[in-house]
Amino acid sequence: MRIYRLKAYCNVNKEFANCTVEALRKTVKELDDQEKFETYPVVWIHDYQLLVAATTIRQVTEEEKLRCKLAFFLHIPFPSWDIMRLFPWDDEILQGMLACDMVGFHIEDYCLNFIDCCSRRLGCRVDRNNMLVELAGRTVHIKALPIGIPFDRFVQLAETTPKFLKLAESEKIILGVDRLDYTKGLVHRILAFERLLEKYPEHVEKVTLLQISVPSRTDVREYRQLKEEMDQLVGRINGRFSMPNWSPIRYIYGGVTQEQLAAFYRDSAVALVTPLRDGMNLVAKEYVACQIREPGVLILSPFAGAGGMMHEALVVNPYEIDKAADTIHRALHMPLDEREVRMKQLRHREQQMDVNHWMNSFLATMGAVNNDEDDPLSTKMTPLTLDDFDQYLNNHIDTICKLSLILDYDGTLAPLTSHPDLAIMSDETKRVLERLSNMPDVNIAIISGRSLENVRRMVGLDQLTYAGSHGIEILHPDGTKFVHPVPFEFAEKLRELVHELEKEVGHSGAWVEHKGVLLTFHYRETPPQQRDEIVRRACEIFQNAGFEPHEAHMAIEAKPPVKWDQGRACIHILRTMYGADWSERVRIVYAGTEAAMQALSGIACTFRVDSSPTVRTAANFRLEGPDAVLTMLKWVEKQMNKRSPRITRSPRLSRSPKHQRKQNTLDYSLSFEDEEDIIGNSSGNFLTNGRQRRYNTNSLSSN
């Protein structure tokens, strides 16, 4: 059911996004026809119903190079990290919002909650002082923009609307106006009013609570239960306190006209706006706007966004029933001069910060008001520096333990390119890796989807551990080699798979890369409108051949169905490098793709290296690309250079006879944790580097 709801929600968002993109195409064309090439259309997305719509809009506009500015405003509170983490799709929500250039909230607390979630859930770099978030190289501006009301419109209604309430000469009205929603604190409010009548009986027959509850989500069970609870509570209190000519609560379950509402606001002595949680709550502002005669008193919950800015109101915690009753009593007895001072300040602020001010402030923040001024969104996060890694790694690297660096190659050490042969690691990165590999307390492993020989050739450094084919082949610096068994039958299937892929989908810029025991189908150069169909067909071909399709960056990798992946390969490397008790003596830093994140979660500091903003990750932090990884490696080198010189090398490197590699006498070690993956293992047949080898399995030992 949850998955169905997520898909339905995303489909609705995609429909809105597609309509928006179509309108954007027309707008950009009109601007181009008028030669307004520097004018950027603004797309303004509102509220929680469309949290992920910007993801699709951003993807399409970048592919089609449609210029625009994306903005989002959330009209409800944004939760703190400990609440947001309970949501199963929190990363999709956060990434959807971060697809915009600017994200607005009612108050600063909501901004800081959002920034904290981006940092802790997505591993984004953030600037809390300037309220900036960086994702995939883009800087997203976060801003508090409290919404206002059409102040003058409510004043006009209050001046022209006749009186609807028929009151006794000394009777006062306490007003509550809300949707019938459990966040509005209606039950707590009614209980506080009951407590008022209990503690201060002088208000009996003198004060009436007028509670207007507008029906909301009547098909939801919880809302129906709330209505029943309210009906019973109001009936009980009215039955307890009613007099022949007076009932303590007038309860309206239904809507009222705007004219009636303005009259209720104007003629009420006290307004109770006491939600348990609310984004802003415009009822408080509307009440203030309509106070054109003898001023009343606003009682406000601190859990409404308005509670943080309407300082002259009486603020009360709705959970504190006794305190709320005392506050209502104080409001009913507040002298006129104090009421006038408080209401004057409240009205002045709301008049200045009305809905037009809110809209203009938002557009000004987007740079859409005055094109002559500098673009407010031009402010960017400061470039990544060594100091940034103080907070990432300072508590992870100590002065005693050894350090193991496990790094992916493509997209991590070398940039992603149109062809794997063009992915060349920079000379500076190579020099830093070489210096680190010569440090006695540092060991480096490079793990890649490339073949073992290819990744060795591309890096070209001794003293490193290399893992090719996503860890199926592992070569240590001393020459010992591990090859995970692959069923021999997949060698022939792989050749057939290459031919079928080239025949069926090897067109429109797509091509197949053979990697020995693996292959990768690349579609980076395929036109966007053809990708979905080509990828779908390629996955079908993989599955029909018995291979598992795994998504990579603009590529699909076909892996044989063996229970071995980069995560298990990383654990194997650590175990064979340091021994069974490695976790007590070694600190691990991993930077790469998602393939090993789950296995290393909790035991390593992990960095997801990816320029895509819409990637789900279990990593601790995100880095944009190879330049950021180089900065991280420089920080590690700086920290390790602070240690006292040592002579000892790691156990495996200390017994590394270099002549073994020259003589090509490699020691093959196999893992038999997955013997069911070996077909015909009684005869010792398995696939290694695309060639059949025959071994006496009884003589093989496992690392």
Image (cartoon, rainbow, N blue to C red):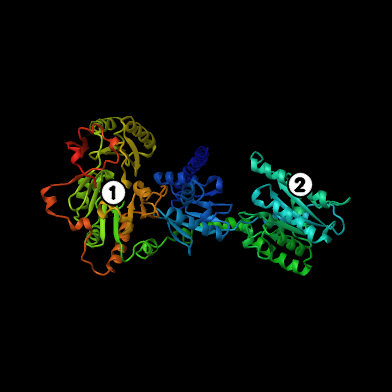
Res. 509 in view: no
The residue at the point 89 percent across, 50 percent down is 244
Q: How far across and down, in percent of the image, does residue 676 sit?
A: 29, 35
Q: Nearer the viewer, residue 651 or 529?
A: 651
Q: Position of residue 572 (x, y in %)?
A: 28, 48
Residue under pointer 2: 252
Q: Residues within 10 Å of mark 1 (few under 14, many from 20)?
A: some
Instruction: Name the residue tied to disc 1.
Output: 572
Mark 2 vs mark 1: in front: 1
Residue type (three-letter) at the residue carrying disc 2: Ile
Q: Is residue 318 visible?
A: yes
Residue 21 position within the rendered picture, expressed as x and y whole percent measured from the top left: 48, 43
Q: Amino acid at mark 1?
A: His
Tag 1 secondary structure:
helix
Q: Residues within 10 Å of mark 2 (few under 14, many from 20)?
A: few
Q: For this rendering, which residue is in front, 576 or 481?
A: 576
